[in-house]
Structure formats: structure tokens, C-alpha cells
Image: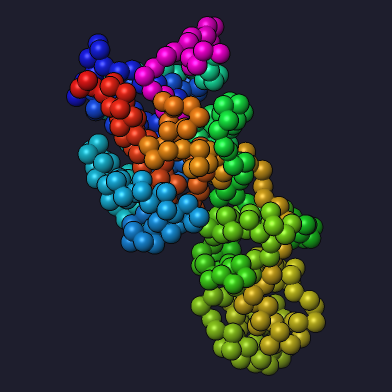
Amino acid sequence: MNPTPTSPRVAIIGAGPAGLMAAEVLAQAGLTVDLYERMPSVGRKFLLAGVGGMNITHSEAKPAFISRYGARAQPVSQWLEAFDAEALRAWIHGLGIDTFVGTSGRVFPTDMKAAPLLRAWLKRLRELGVQIHTRQHWLGWDEHGALRIAGADTEQLLRPAATLLALGGGSWPRLGSDGAWVELLSARQVQITALEPSNCGFEVNAWSPFLRDKFAGAPLKNVSLQLPDQAPRVGEFVLTDGGIEGSLVYALSADIRRTLNQHGSATVYLDLLPQTPVDKLHKALSKPRGSQSLAKHLHRQAGIDGVKSALLRELTSAAAFNHPAQLAAAIKALPITLVKARPLAEAISSAGGVSFAALDQNLMLSTVPGTFCAGEMLDWEAPTGGYLLTACFASGRQAAMGVLRWLATQGKSPAA
């Protein structure tokens, strides 16, 4: 359904996945849609996220999928009820892009790239009549409630029938999501939870010069990490010059951050050999090593060498190496004490944002009627693996449907 000259005009601020999805839904409903983006082109974070392979969503069962959103599982599940992982895949197929499920359960476009998907999507949006305005910076509202949009040389004031904000969080600010909207919304009495790094690395007090200089950047594969009283997660991560980062760390980042906030430090336990029971490991390490060095013995009996061996020596007392039971226990639960998260600007995503208490069921701001929010600027988070993108798409659709419902109550629907 194409817009008519009398169609209500909606302004969307932010052209990431949430904003683009909202634009599609609203344009299909017959509204006139203007999409404003401060960067020179749209979807920059989306494109960068796809550089190593565009992980668009995940194939796991819906109950497990929803659990990935932790404390925000309930509101996010409402978005996913209308647009879940299967619906997202079907939508991508509708753009002419095939997908496949990888061995990890993650879902990718067949060519593993984000750019072809974005090109096909923008073509559809143009055909729907969506007007995309780049290099346009939203500055908030003037004293009369009009939107302030600054271009290269001029500032314009807009009074759309509705406004949808999809401004991202505070991570990767060079791509446009710098969190500057926090101050603008706070001035309108919008309740906001402070932005914090999510899916990020963490620091230790200090590695030894030997470990830092020789093994920074080395991956630890086929290991598990866990916080106390939680089930271990198996995967891999990378040793950095100041701590740890990588997919396995990201999976625990929300709980690590909360523990840091509460106690000032967080200890995670690393199992270097998650597939080997401790008693079997103890038995292997108890074998006489004869003239072999301890390093050779560890390699032959447990397959531990390289960065695993170095980290074991870094975090285990010298005395434990003379006692197979103690050494086996250390290999199975090596404590790594983390003292702070890496900066928000380095994080893959951010936690915090517009509180759900500040929104009605349509994702409209209670203190700014006619203004809706979507995407990462809302107070939710998720691990990597397709969960972030899926919820961003779904929230954009949810907010757009909220716009349509609200406009109908105002007598401004396309059919009005």
C-alpha cells in the first residue's frame, strides 16, 4: 500500500535494523515515512556485524531462545510472539536471500554477507515510498514540541503525526550509536537505566609480563566457564593483554557485570578440559613421569600445552603441581578474578536504556505522547548468536504496530 498525499507522516530517527523494520511496516500500512540517519549511510553497525559472517538469528527452540534475554525475557517474548526467528528467516527469504543453519544452530545468509541483504531491503523500502535522509542529526525538541533535525548547513523543525526513535545504545559510537539521546530523553522525564557494556571483554588486575607478552591474543578452545552456582558454558574465548574476551565471555557478560556492580569483582571458573572427568584426569596425572619434564607430562597425559599450560601456571600455586589431585582440581576449576568491564565504546552491545516502565504497551513514551522507541535503546540485552539482531527486528515491528494503533485512536490512520 503506497502513501497518498494525505497519508499521516511519520518520522523515524535511526536507520539500523529496528528503524528500517519499522519503516517497512509503516510504509506497507500506507503511511508517509521519513527516515533520518545521522551517518552518511544506513545500517552501518549491521554491516560491520556481518563482516565475519552475518549471524542473523538462531534456530534453537523458542523457550530456550526467549531465556537468552534474562531479566527482560517477558517483554521481549511479546515482540517475538509476533515476529520470531522463523518469521525473520521467512522475511529474509522474501527478500530473495537464502539462509542456512550452521553446526552451532546459528542462522546465516547463504553467502554469509550482510550487504546483499541490506541492498535488497533498501530496494524494497524505496519501492514502498520510504524517504531516507542521511547526514541528519536529531537534536531533540524545541520549546513547542517540534523535532529539531540538523543537516550540514541548516536546521529544520518537523511536526510528524508520530515519531519513532531507534537510536541504538552506546556501543561502537563511531558507527552512530553514541547514547547522546540519553540526555535528550532525560530532559523529558523519561526513566532511563544507565548504559553499560554488554557482550564485552573484562579485565584482571594484571597478567604476568610473560603471559601478556607471549600469549595475548591466543584462543582457548573447547573450554568451559562458569560463575559460582551457575551451570558451565562450553565454547572458546581469547586471552587479551589485560584480561579475557570472546564469545564464551560474552555469554556470561550480563551476570559478570552484575556481580562486578554488586561486589567490585567477579570470579569465573575455567575448566580447561570440560570433557574429561576429574577422577580420570587425576588418574592420568598420577602416572609416573620418569625423566619427563612436568610440561611434557601435562602434554602427554592431559593434552595441555601452549596458552592453556601458561594460564594454568599463572593461576595455580607451584605446590599444586607436585600433587596430582590438586593439579587435576585446578585444571577443572581455574579461578579467574575479573575487576572491571572493558569500556562501553568497545562493547558489541550495551545494556540499559529506556526503561519499560517509561513505555506503554505500544512502546510509546508515557511522558512524550506520539513518540515511540525500538531497538537497542530499550533496556534489554542478549548474548551474541543472533539474539540481538532478532530482538532489534522484532522491536521495530512491535513499535511500528504501536504507532498504527495509536494513530487509529487519534483519527489519523491511513484509512481515516
Residue 299 in the figure: left or right of residue 12: right
- In the image, taking residue 362 as reference, residue 141 lies left or right, namely right
Magenta-highlighted residues: 143-166
Q: Nearer the viewer, residue 60 or 322?
A: 60
Type of colouring: rainbow
Q: Quadrant of residue 260?
A: bottom right
Query: Is residue 9 something one can see in this rendering?
Result: yes
Q: Is residue 141 above or below residue 124?
A: above
Q: Residue reaching furthest top?
A: 154
**Percent x, y for residue 188?**
57, 26
Residue 410 lies in the magenta stretch: no
Q: Nearer the viewer, residue 209 or 231?
A: 231
Tell me the residue at 38%/23% (across/down): 162
| Quadrant of the image occupied by residue 265 | bottom right
Residue 208 location, x and y as percent? 79, 60
Quadrant where the image shows the C terminus: top left
Q: How many marks?
A: 0
- Point out residue 346 in the picture as x, y percentages from the top left corner: 61, 42
Does residue 364 lie above or below 316 as drawn? above
> In the image, 10: left or right of 98?
right
Q: Residue at x 29, y 21 (%)?
A: 412
**Relative to 9, residue 88 above or below:** below
Residue positioned 50% across, 23% down in the render: 39
Say if the magenta span includes residue 150.
Answer: yes
Q: Position of residue 79 (x, y in %)?
A: 36, 46
User: Is residue 350 among the parts visible in the rendering?
Assistant: no
Residue at image point 54% right, 75% down = 274
In the rendered image, the quadrant that contains the N terminus is top left
Viewer-proximal residue among 347 and 262? 262
